[in-house]
Image: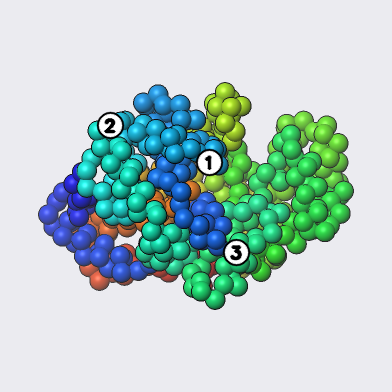
Amino acid sequence: MPTPHPDRYFASDPTQREIARELYAAANEHPIISPHGHVPPEWLAENTPFTDPTSMLLTPDHYTNRILHGVAGVDLADLGVPVGSPMTPEKSRAAWRLLCENWWAFRGTAVAGWLASELSDVFGIEVTPSGQTADAIYDSIAECLASDEFRPRALYERFNLAVLATTDDPVSDLRHHGALAADPTWSGRVIPTFRPDAYLEPVRADWLALTEALGEAADQDVSTYAGHVEAMRLRRRFFKDMGAVSSDHSHRDPGTARLTDAEAERLYQLALSGRICPDDADRLRRHMVNDQARLACEDGLVMTFHPAVARNHDPKAFARLGADVGGDIPMETEFTNNLAPMLAEYGDQPNFQVVLFTMDQDVYQRELAPLAGYYPGVYVGAPWWFLDEPDAILRYREQVTPYATFYKTSGMIDDTRAFASIPARHDVARRIDARYLARLVAEHRLSLEEAREVAVDLVTTIPTRAFKLS
């Protein structure tokens, strides 16, 4: 496997390509800011060695798994899914062989670029994965993982990470974050993220148990809706005291319509009794999300919205393997009307800030960019999940920049559970941004100096501002 080309993702036009090289080099002098992801904090707190190549690179990577499953017909369970399943040496090696034997399936995808970068840049692999090379590649990576240079903390330093955000349950004691903060040998910055969406879905079968756990964690009576809001306020404050800068919200729609206090209490009591219908549960959830925005005005946590995902679309895989195994599908969504109640109430509050993500790229230019261009506290999140591939990132820049500007975007979001993929994903974004900026320079729409400043801002001040990281 040849080393990934140094000009990958740049335009083929020689003039633009030369400019892009310079802009990319300027951005690459700066460390990675990763304000939204799913790397477990215990990996860094405990600095436990990665056990095998499959558990590190393959099993936690939903993108890779879904292609192997959907294109090559591989059973997800044979890839170690879900994360945490028993992984014998034999099963690990067999899963790795499936990846290498089906390397052809990734041609032309973002996943191919990420994996090639990980294998080459992180592990020094110089042969193309295949059925014939699978065992040799596996053994080479396993040998690397046995050394201290490939432990999580060493990789954090090697990847040049400035900030790494995790995603955490509202009732978590955040002990791993506390351990890192108290460790005199640790100089990195790993911050928690408050993820309350499961606690805001009264139609869930486990919602009552979650609500009781929330009350216990906050030492708060949650028998009334006001008590539920107070428990949320206390837990959000705890997270902020532990370094959190944002809360994370994912629902089927981005609705934020408020109810009267009496109606919210009535529906809350129905939910506690298990008698709430789905439509009323949605109404209560939208009211709860609105209250999260109200709390954000108090504590300053940035809201991140990524709605409109059909979760666990494959019911058989969900029943057999559980949630979050890659069977999620994008949905059409609408932001302008859904967010109107929240923005009318809090859009001009100086402490309120929200980053809007989407997998429906039709709304970038029509809704998200104009919203961010008008409301001071609204930002447009990076191309994310199904849209974080090179062509979609370029379309994002073309559609969002004219209305929201570079400075109301979020910076790159890797959203990954696969630790070694973080630098590869950020590298693609930096290259596409350099490509876009190079075209503006070549067309005399920006000076080279302005473009260089933007290229640096996109990896420094822009994500810092969007997520209040300073």
- Mark 2 in CB contact with mark 1 (< 8 angstroms): no
Instruction: Pinpoint residue 420: horizontal percent, then vertical percent.
Output: 40, 52
**Tag 1 residue:** 83
How many numbered tags mark residues here?
3
Q: Quadrant of the N terminus?
A: top left
Give the left or right position of residue 23, taking residue 462 as reference. Answer: left
User: In this image, 235 relative to 335: left or right?
Assistant: right
- Residue at 50% of width from left, 57% of height from top? 48
Mark toward the start of the polypeptide (3 vs 1):
1
Look at discs 2 and 1 and give the one toward the viewer: 2
Between the residue at mark 2 and the residue at mark 1, the CA separation in whole angstroms equals 24 Å
Image height of 47 relative to 103, above or below: below
Q: Nearer the viewer, residue 290 or 141?
A: 141
Label 3 to label 1, Cα distance in Å? 21 Å
| Mark 3 nearby-residue class (10 Å; few <14, some 14–19, many ≥20) | many
Q: Amino acid at mark 1?
A: Val
The residue positioned 69% from the left and 59% from the top of the image is 173
Q: Which mark is residue 131?
A: 2
What's the amino acid at mark 2? Gly
Question: Which residue carries the number 3 mark?
Answer: 177
Residue 421 drawn at (x, y percent): 39, 51
Res 463 visible = no
Residue found 32% across the figure and 55% down from its top: 122
Q: Earlier in the sequence, mark 2 or mark 1?
A: 1
Write the residue at 77% across / 49% down. 213
